[in-house]
Image (cartoon, rainbow, N blue to C red):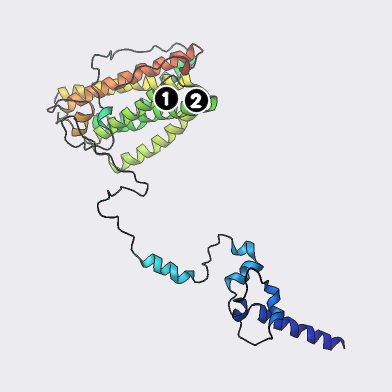
């Protein structure tokens, strides 16, 4: 008796599964007719198992079917292929083509005379005339312990640089600018984050420090036209920049007055290096070639400007950086923060 009941139960379950997941029956599933009512609505007709239709699966497993899984929907595989093979629709005639998916078009920038602007690394409104009357002989005498640490740290860095580059001032300038462009970016970034955390303005110092970093980068772009670095010099730049960035980042977090004083002394050394560069140009040891076109546009030099003119304006920029960073360090020595003192004027 028990065996007969078990066999009868298995037969009913087998018929139930076939009926429930039969494609012929599942087509009758509607909102007003539950899936389980189909089992009792018609006599059983054997048929081969088929893939469950979406309507049945949605009723049985609504969460799984409604998920955003990567499995294609029923009948979607062929439709996907057709969608991929169809070319994108062309814009209607007379409409203006956009430069990107977001509808952003590149600006058409021209010079004052109407000719197209050919530089992407800086814009016409970022050009300026360097102040060549700036005092090049200013020097901050180290008095405090932090001043002496900053001064002798910079002096110790100059020694291996002199040995490596000697009097190859074109390559030396390139190496110098890859390092000199780091402090302004690090300091500006940290002041930017501080301004956001404290919900207070920066006194204009963020823009001044970022302009300093951008100005140093333009020095590098200029000297790239004068001297091309060798492969081992590129490796050296990669290594030195990585070490210096992290070291300066930590130094600025610990003591901004030490960090700014160090940059002030670095700029004093840069002035000395460019002065030696000018001496070799004037003595004929280095050919005074025409100035690169990028330098003529950036500093608004004469059309017949030479490399000597470029070195002079770069040296003036370094003197400006020297004064700004020594001034920033003095502010911290007085127990104030940069935001409490208006930033000096920039270049433009």
Q: Earlier in the sequence, mark 1 or mark 2?
A: 2
Is the N terminus in the top left, top right, bottom left or bottom right quadrant? bottom right
Q: Is residue 52 left or right of residue 158?
A: right
Q: CA distance from mark 1 to mark 2?
A: 9 Å
Query: Foreground: 58 or 180?
Result: 58
In the orientation shown, which residue stands out farthest toward the left? 304
Secondary element type, mark 2: helix
Q: Is residue 345 above or below residue 246?
A: above
Query: Foreground: 196 or 323?
Result: 196
Secondary element type, mark 1: helix
Q: Residue at x 49, y 72 (%)?
A: 75
Query: Foreground: 307 or 203?
Result: 203
Q: Position of residue 165 (x, y in %)?
A: 28, 32
**Would residue 323 be visible to someone looking at this image?**
yes
Q: Position of residue 286 (x, y in %)?
A: 17, 29
Is the C terminus in the top left, top right, bottom left or bottom right quadrant? top left
Q: Which mark is residue 18?
A: none
In the orientation shown, which residue stands out farthest toward the right? 1
Q: Position of residue 174 (x, y in %)?
A: 29, 33
> Badge 2, how many Cα within 10 Å: few under 14, some, many 20+?
some
Q: Is residue 132 above or below residue 110?
A: above
Q: Residue at x 18, y 25 (%)?
A: 301
Q: Do labels 1 and 2 touch, CB within 8 Å?
A: yes
Q: Position of residue 4 (x, y in %)?
A: 83, 88
The residue to which callout 2 is attached is 195
Instruction: Tell me which corner region of the image, top left, top right, bottom left or bottom right, holds residue 213.
Output: top left
The residue to which callout 1 is attached is 206
In the orientation shown, which residue stands out farthest toward the front? 32
**Would residue 165 be visible to someone looking at this image?**
no
Q: Residue at x 31, y 28 (%)?
A: 215
Q: Is residue 71 left or right of residue 282?
A: right
Q: Is residue 67 above or below residue 118?
A: below
């Amino acid at each position: 008796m028990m065996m007969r009941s078990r066999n009868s139960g298995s037969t009913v379950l087998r018929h139930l599964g076939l009926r429930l997941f039969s494609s012929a029956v599942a087509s009758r599933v509607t909102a007003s007719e539950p899936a389980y009512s189909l089992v009792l609505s018609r006599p059983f007709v054997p048929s081969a198992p088929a893939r469950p239709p979406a309507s049945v699966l949605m009723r049985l497993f609504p969460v799984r079917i409604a998920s955003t899984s990567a499995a294609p929907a029923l009948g979607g595989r062929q439709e996907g292929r057709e969608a991929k093979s169809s070319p994108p629709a062309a814009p209607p005639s007379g409409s203006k083509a956009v430069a990107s998916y977001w509808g952003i078009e590149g600006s058409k920038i021209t010079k004052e005379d109407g000719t197209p602007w050919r530089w992407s690394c800086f814009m016409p409104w970022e050009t300026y005339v360097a102040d060549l009357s700036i005092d090049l002989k200013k020097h901050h005498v180290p008095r405090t312990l932090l001043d002496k640490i900053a001064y002798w740290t910079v002096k110790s860095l100059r020694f291996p640089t002199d040995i490596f580059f000697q009097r190859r001032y074109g390559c030396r300038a390139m190496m110098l600018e890859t390092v000199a462009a780091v402090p302004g970016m690090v300091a500006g970034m940290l002041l930017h984050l501080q301004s956001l955390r404290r919900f207070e303005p920066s006194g204009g110092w963020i823009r001044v420090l970022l302009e300093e970093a951008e100005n140093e980068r333009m020095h590098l772009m200029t000297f790239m036209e004068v001297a091309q670095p060798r492969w081992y010099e590129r490796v050296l730049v990669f290594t030195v920049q990585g070490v210096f960035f992290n070291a300066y980042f930590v130094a600025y977090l610990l003591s901004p007055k030490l960090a700014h004083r160090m940059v002030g002394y670095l700029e004093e050394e840069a002035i000395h290096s460019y002065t030696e560069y000018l001496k070799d140009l004037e003595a004929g040891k280095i050919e005074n070639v025409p100035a690169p076109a990028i330098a003529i546009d950036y500093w608004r030099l004469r059309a017949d400007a030479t490399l000597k003119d470029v070195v002079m304006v770069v040296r003036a920029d370094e003197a400006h950086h020297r004064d700004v960073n020594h001034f920033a360090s003095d502010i911290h020595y007085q127990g104030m923060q940069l935001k409490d003192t208006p930033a000096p004027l920039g270049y433009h």
